[in-house]
Amino acid sequence: MSDYVLKVNNLSKKFKNQVALNKVNLSIKKGAIYGFIGQNGAGKSTLIRIVSGLADKTSGTVELFGYNNGQELIKARKRMGTIIEGPALYPHMTAAENLEAHRLLKGIPGKECVEKTLALVGLQDTGKKKAKNFSLGMKQRLGIAITLLGDPEFLILDEPINGLDPMGVVEIRELLKRLNQEYGITILISSHILSELYLLATHYGIIHKGNLLEQLTLDELNAKCKQYLHIKVDNTEKAATIIETRLKTNDFEVMPNGVIKLFDSIDESGKVSSILVNENLVIEELMPMGQDLESYFMKRIGGIHHG
Amino acid sequence: MGNLFKSELYKLKKDRSFLLLTILLVIVSICYPLLIVFDEGAGLIKISDFYQSTVLNGNNYVIKLAPCILAGFFISNEYSFGTMKNIGASGNSRFRIYFAKLMVFSIGAIIISLILPIVMTGASALYSGFHDMPELGYFVKTIGLTILYAASFSSLMALLATILTESGKAIAFMLLFFLLFDGILYGLSTLIPIFELVLKYSIFDLLLKIVNVDTFMNGGMNKMIIVPIITYGIFGLLGSLLFIKKEIK
């Protein structure tokens, strides 16, 4: 048996003249929580839709649980649950009725799994309330409940925490961690909230303009989130010019709040400090710090970084 | 296929448009003959005439129009709600998904199309004291053909609902299409002879002939049976091919 739940090889997708995915190679190990990171239109949803069988690929292969051809690949999808671009619910049905429709679809014997799954996501007390009257958080949880029917081994969750309040975000995070740790479910999750992904995922894939730039584990990410000098002075513009001219580097980033993140000279904070002081700048803060996932992602896709 | 079918059947039972159409047609079926009884007196109603002139002719509109509303809610709404994504990713082939949906939709269309012939005829028979009932053979044949034509129209509606994917648009377009299409076809047939042949062998024209089922010889009856079956197959296959190629959004 393959150690990988999902393997995508040289996957490409073209819409007329636009390349949505360009020879993407991606693999997700059994038991991983894979954070899929990319801007809007980067190709995340396109890849997820192809893996789920909702869209055709232009070229390349998709291997799910070791199966990569026709009927076997279709059947392998019975072992996964998906939420793609928000939870898909029947608004005129209750939570239990929504689950019942999907229980029948998946051919799960016995109605007891409906109540059990509702309890797992904390929706056991919704009674006759229709899904259309649910809050966004409840809808997201019901969407996750639907994916959990039939004890899937692999969950694909496209933006499952979109629009949730902070409590809702924490609840979903805890639920997904529990599903991964207690039930061994492998999860592919995409989200714009990178701080959340950092708290949840064990592996990461960064996609940009249809190209998978990098795949890395949490440990590798932590190692790669290199240290920087966090500098706050009374005149940011002047400090930026001095760093460029005196330290001869442009490997730094000026944040909107005036903080400068200097990725060079990390071990030379004394030198940096004396240069800034000699130029009559008042140093308010100067300390070594680590990059977070968001900064790393922005740097990786060539965002606002100067370097 | 069994799982898909059960799930679709469950959704049909929960579909509000199906329930509403059924209830409305049952109310009309019970109340309309009552109005005639009040107007003309129970003894004057000949059920056999009433069945031909009112029930079957009126039911032609029900067969062509009422399931359009069901198609909009039962099929197109799956795309609007996004629930078709769940079905598409459920590990079933697109062909099976489409045919399960089509079969259950056809069942819904058949149920709706049988309300007038059964409930209205039954109600009027009760009110008139079973006065001059239609012959059993004739009644059974018309019911059988009603089932066939309701199913064949439903396969065309399922195809259109799959193309349009938005319930409002789908319902409006289909109502217009099914109201005007046979008129357009008739107009074209007077101008271009090939369309006369198309019209002659189309479910649109043959539907109107159900009422004359007792006058058909063998060949005519065969045509009445074979055309809707072939139509169901053709539009079912066309719809499934379209659905297999379709990107589910």
Image (cartoon, coloured by chain):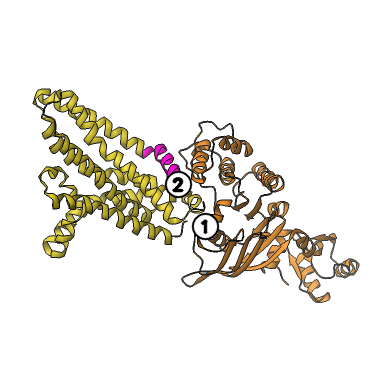
Give left or right: position of A5 versus B208: right
Tell me the subunit letter for badge 2: B
Chain B shown in which color?
yellow
Mark number, residue A74: 1
Mark number, residue A41: none
- Quadrant for residue B188, please give it: bottom left
Give left or right: position of B132 versus A176: left
- Quadrant for residue B123, please give it: top left
Residue occupying the point 46% across, 71% down = A16
Local packing at callout 1 (Cα closer than 10 Å; few below 14, some 14-19, many 20+) is many
Q: Is residue A198 magenta?
A: no
Residue A218: percent from the left, percent from the top?
A: 75, 58
Residue A235: percent from the left, percent from the top?
A: 78, 64
Amino acid at the residue labelled 2: Leu
- Quadrant for residue B140, please give it: top left
Residue occupying the point 69% across, 63% down = A297
Q: What stretch of residues is rendered in magenta?
A: B1-17
Amino acid at the residue labelled 1: Ile
Residue under label 2, please give it. Answer: B4
Residue B59: percent from the left, percent from the top?
A: 21, 40
Residue B170: percent from the left, percent from the top?
A: 34, 51
**Number of marks:** 2
Q: Looking at this view, name the residue that lies furthest to the front.
A: B218
Give left or right: position of A275 versus A169: right
Chain with colour orange in the figure? A
Of A155 and A192, nearer the camera is: A155
Assign the magenta stretch its main secondary structure. helix
Q: Please, what secondary structure does the residue beneath circle 1 have?
A: helix
